[in-house]
């Protein structure tokens, strides 16, 4: 049996972050967490790009354009969609998720879903917290692991 455990890449990587401005006070914490993870794992500042979009609904388009450039080994989408009293949450979260998945498949590129979808602000703040509780940090680690996996699968 061939097994491919998760591991970090053994090469220089270029990562793009696309972040939704809506709920900025939460998303900035996700961005900070992603930067922290990338820096701790050897990704140089000059190899990280950050683009801001108005909100989560706009993330798939920006991620598609970033992927199309061919300059990045992975793209991380960061945002926060917090449930309100209308069905707006369902439309934004669903279309964002679907759009990001489509981009990854279209370009065979790791597109990492770092969009919080929570019932309230407290849940979002908990998931954007410091250290192990920061989902931005987790998405950056996942991006690096996926880069390594794609390298190994494509080498076969």
Image (cartoon, helix red, strand yellow):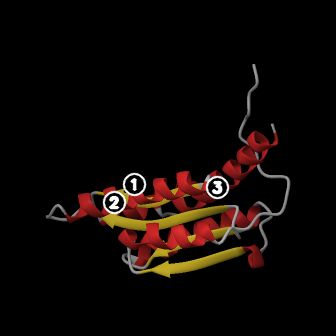
Q: Secondary structure at mark 3?
A: helix
Q: Which residue is mark 3?
A: 143
Mark linked to residue 36: none
Evaluate if marks 2 and 1 touch, with contact meaning CB atoms under 8 Å apart.
yes
Task: Identify which residue, 45 or 96, lies in the foreground.
Answer: 96
The quarter of the picture where residue 60 lies is bottom left
Residue drawn at the location 63% of the way across and 59% of the way down: 140
Within 10 Å of disc 1 (Cα), the crowding (few <14, some 14-19, many 20+) is few
Instruction: Read off the residue under disc 2.
Output: 95
Q: Cβ–Cβ below 8 Å for labels 2 and 3?
A: no
Residue occupying the point 70% across, 64% down: 38
- Residue shown at the point (77%, 63%) measured from the top left: 13
- Compute the Cα span from label 1 to label 3: 18 Å
Q: Sequence-wise, which precedes: disc 2 or disc 3?
A: 2
Image location (x, y in percent) of residue 119: 27, 57
Q: Crowdedness of circle 3 by 10 Å Cα count: few (<14), some, many (20+)?
A: many
User: On the image, numbered disc 1 is attached to which residue?
Assistant: 98
Quarter occupied by residue 89:
bottom left
Q: Which mark's residue is nearer the viewer, 2 or 3?
A: 2
Residue 5 lies, in percent from the top left, at: 73, 35
Tell me residue 71's x, y (percent): 71, 70
Q: Nearer the viewer, residue 74 or 42?
A: 74
């Amino acid at each position: 049996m061939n097994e491919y455990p998760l591991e970090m890449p053994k090469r220089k990587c270029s990562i793009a972050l696309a972040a939704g401005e809506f709920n900025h006070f939460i998303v900035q914490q996700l961005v900070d967490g992603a930067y922290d993870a990338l820096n701790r794992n050897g990704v140089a500042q000059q190899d990280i790009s950050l683009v801001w979009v108005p909100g989560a609904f706009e993330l798939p388009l920006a991620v598609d354009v970033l992927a199309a450039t061919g300059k990045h080994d992975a793209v991380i989408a960061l945002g926060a969609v917090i449930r309100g009293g209308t069905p707006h949450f369902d439309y934004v979260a669903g279309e964002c998720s679907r759009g990001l998945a489509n981009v990854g498949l279209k370009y065979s590129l790791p597109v990492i879903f770092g969009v919080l979808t929570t019932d309230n602000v407290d849940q979002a703040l908990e998931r954007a917290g410091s250290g192990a509780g920061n989902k931005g940090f987790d998405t950056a680690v996942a991006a690096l692991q996926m880069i390594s996996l794609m390298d190994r699968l494509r080498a076969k």
